[in-house]
Amino acid sequence: MTENESQKKREEEEKALVEEVQTDFKRRQEERRGIERSWQLNMNFLNGNQYCDVNAIGELEGESGGYFWQEKRVFNYIAPTVDTRCCKLTGIRPRLAVRAASDDDDDRRSAKLASAILTATCEDCAIDSVIAAATVWSEACGTAFYKVTWDSYAGNEIGRLSDGSSVRQGKVRITAVSPFEIYPDSLSEENLYNQPSIIHARAVPVGDIFAAYGVEVDGRDIDEYAQSPSNKPSHATGHGRYSRTVKHGYEVVIERYVRPNSKNPDGRLTIVAGDKLLFDGALPYINGDSQNRTYPFAAQYCIPLAGAFFGTCIVDRLIPVQRAYNAVKNRKHEFLNRIAMGMLAVEDGSVDTDELLEDGLMPGKILVYRQGGTPPQMLTLGSVPSEFTTEEERLEEEFSKISGTSDITQAANSFTSVTSATGLQLIIEQDEARLNVCYEQIKAALKTIGKMSLRLYRQFASSVRLMSYSAGNDGLSAISFKGSDIMGDDVVLEADSEINLTPARRRAAIYDMLDKGLFSDENGKVPAAVKSKILETLGYNGFAGGRDLKEMHRQRAAEENDTMRRGGAAEVKEYDDHGAHVEEHTAYLLSEKLTAEQEKRICAHLNKHKSKISEVKNEG
C-alpha cells in the first residue's frame, strides 16, 4: 500500500469515526429532550417567567387563554425558597484529609502530605465558589457535575521549547459543569461510572478550539442549551429567558469518554468539533480506584431518583404549588379591585356610557342622566371571602413543607411550651433534616474530587514542585513534593466537617467542652497548642500567635528520627526538652520497621537524652 493510499484510508477512517460520534450524540439528544425541557421550565419558574409550560410536542411555550382583564402577575415564591436552601447549603464546606494506611510513620507522613496537597488544591481552585456554582445547578435542575482535569498550560514555568513557547508544571483544574452538557449512554443507569460511555458536549469559540487542538473549524450559531445549530434570529428567542440563547462563532466540541473494556483496556476518548476529529486515544487520566482509568467527572444530586441517571429537584415539586399560589393571589387582587373601583349598573340609554367608561365616577363629577331614567347604581360586592386568605396561607405552608426550609421564627407559636436550649436545638435539627440528602451529596462529590486530584498529581507531577496554602494564624505554609511521594488517597472528611454546625453552634459546642474539661491535661490546664487551636476556631487568630514549644521539640525529634534512619547522626542539644524527645524517639522505635543497625543508632541517641534527664535529677 502506497503512502497516498494509507493517507486516504486514514482520512476515511477519521471521517467515519466523526460521523459515528455525531450520530451517537444526536441519538442521546433526542432521548434526553424531554428532560431538557423540564430543566428549562424549572429555570423559567425560578427566574419569574411562570406563565409557560411544555406543550404536547415537547416544546416550551407561553400559556394563553383567559379574559383580557384577568391579571397574570407572578408572585415568585420559588426564588426565595431556593435562595434559602442555597444559603443553608453553603454552610457545609467540608475540609478534606487523607487517612493513613497504618500507624507507620511513613504512612502518617504521606497522609499528612496528601492532606496538605488537598488543602492547597482546594484553595488554588477556589473550591467554595465551584461548589456554590454546582449547587445552584443542582437546585435548579436536580443534577450538577464536577470535572477534574489536568491543565498542562498552568503552573510555574520550568523551561522553554525551541519555538519559544513555555513549558509549565501543570496543575489540577476543578470546574462546575451544567447538566445540559452531559449526555449519558443510558438514562436508566444510576451510577455515573457504570455508564458504558459519557458525552460532554459544550459550545466553544472557534478561536479557543484552534488554540487547544491546532485545528481550524468553521463557526456557527449554536443553541446554548440544546447544543445544536440554530436557525433562530440573533437574539434570545422562545418563551422565557432560558429557552433559547444563541451564540455566534461557536462550535460544539463533543468529548465522548468510553469506559475501559476488553476492546479498549485503557478506555477511549474521542473529541470531535464540526466535521473535524480533534483527538482519539486512551482515557488520559489514571484517576480511578486500583490505578484504573475512568471518567473525570463527579456527580452531585439535589434528590436522587431510583432508576434514573439524572436526579430531580425541589423546583419540580414546587411548580404546581406556585401555579396555584399565583392563581389565588391574582383572583384575590381582582376581587379587591372590584370592591375598590366598584361596578356600575346603568339603565340602557340613561347616560353617556362612553364618557362614564373613560372618566369613571371621579369625586365631584356631575352625572347627567336621561330625564325619567334610572340613575346609575353601584353594585354591592361585599368583602373578600376568607377562603382566599385561608388558601393563600395553606399554600405558603406547603412551600415550606415541600422545600424543607421552614423558618422556625415564623412558626414560634407552634412550640411556645419549649423553653430549654436542648429542646430548641432538637427542633432546629429536625427543621433542617430535609436538607441532609443534599448535604451528603455534596460530601460524596467532594471526596471523589479529592481522590481524583491526588491521583492526577501522582500521575503528572514527575518533578519536585512547591505549593503553598493557608495554615492558620493568618500565615502560609509551603510543601514540596513529587508524584511518587503520594502513597495513599483514602480521602475522608475531617471530624468537625461531618457536623453541619453554624459558627454560633460551633462556639457553643467549644464553650460546653471547655466547661466539662475535655481540653484539659492531667494537671487540669489547657495546653498552649489546644488553646491556640480554640482561639483560631473561635475566629480570634490574632490572640493565637504564641509558639507551642512542646510541639516544636516534637517536630525536631521527628527530624532527628528521619536523619538517623538514613544513617546520619543527631546531636543532643542542651536546650532540648529531653522528655519530649524520649517520648518521640520511643514512639518511633515502636511504630517503625527498622533494621538492627538503625534501631541501635536511635537507641544510643535515646540513651543520651535519658542520661541528661538523670543528670538534672541528680543536680536537683
Image (cartoon, helix red, strand yellow):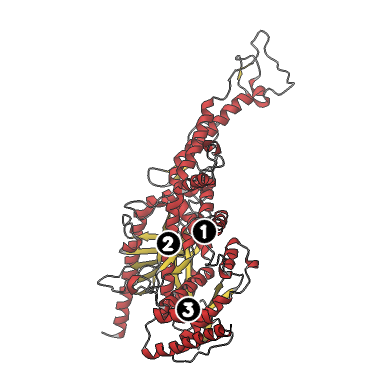
Observer-nearest of 133 and 276 = 133
In the depicted structure, whether residue 336 falls above or below residue 396:
above
Using the image, tell me which numbered label, if any, was put on residue 445. 2
Q: Can the viewer see residue 465 in this picture?
A: no
Who comes first in sequence, dot 2 or dot 1?
Answer: 1
Q: As shown in the figure, which amino acid type bears the numbered disc 2? A: Ala
Find the distance from the CA under tag 2 to the CA under tag 1. Answer: 13 Å
Q: Residue at x 52, y 79 (%)?
A: 579
- The spot of residue 53 in percent (x, y) is 44, 43
* Residue bearing the label numbered 3: 583
Q: Residue furthest top?
A: 372
Q: In which quarter of the image is residue 272?
A: bottom left
Q: As shown in the figure, which amino acid type bears the numbered disc 1? A: Ala
In the depicted structure, whether residue 586 falls above or below residue 518:
below
Q: Is mark 3 on a helix, strand or loop?
A: helix
* Residue bearing the label numbered 1: 132
- The spot of residue 105 in percent (x, y) is 42, 78
Nearer the viewer's eye, disc 2 or disc 3?
A: 3
- The spot of residue 387 in percent (x, y) is 51, 27
- The spot of residue 429 in percent (x, y) is 48, 48
Nearer the viewer's eye, disc 2 or disc 1?
A: 2
Q: As shown in the figure, which amino acid type bears the numbered disc 3? A: Glu
Q: Quadrant of residue 69?
A: top right
Find the distance from the CA under tag 2 to the CA under tag 3. Answer: 40 Å
Q: What element carries label 2?
A: helix
In the rendered view of the protein, which quadrant contains the C terminus?
bottom right
Who comes first in sequence, dot 2 or dot 3?
Answer: 2
Q: Quadrant of residue 363?
A: top right
Q: What element carries label 1?
A: helix
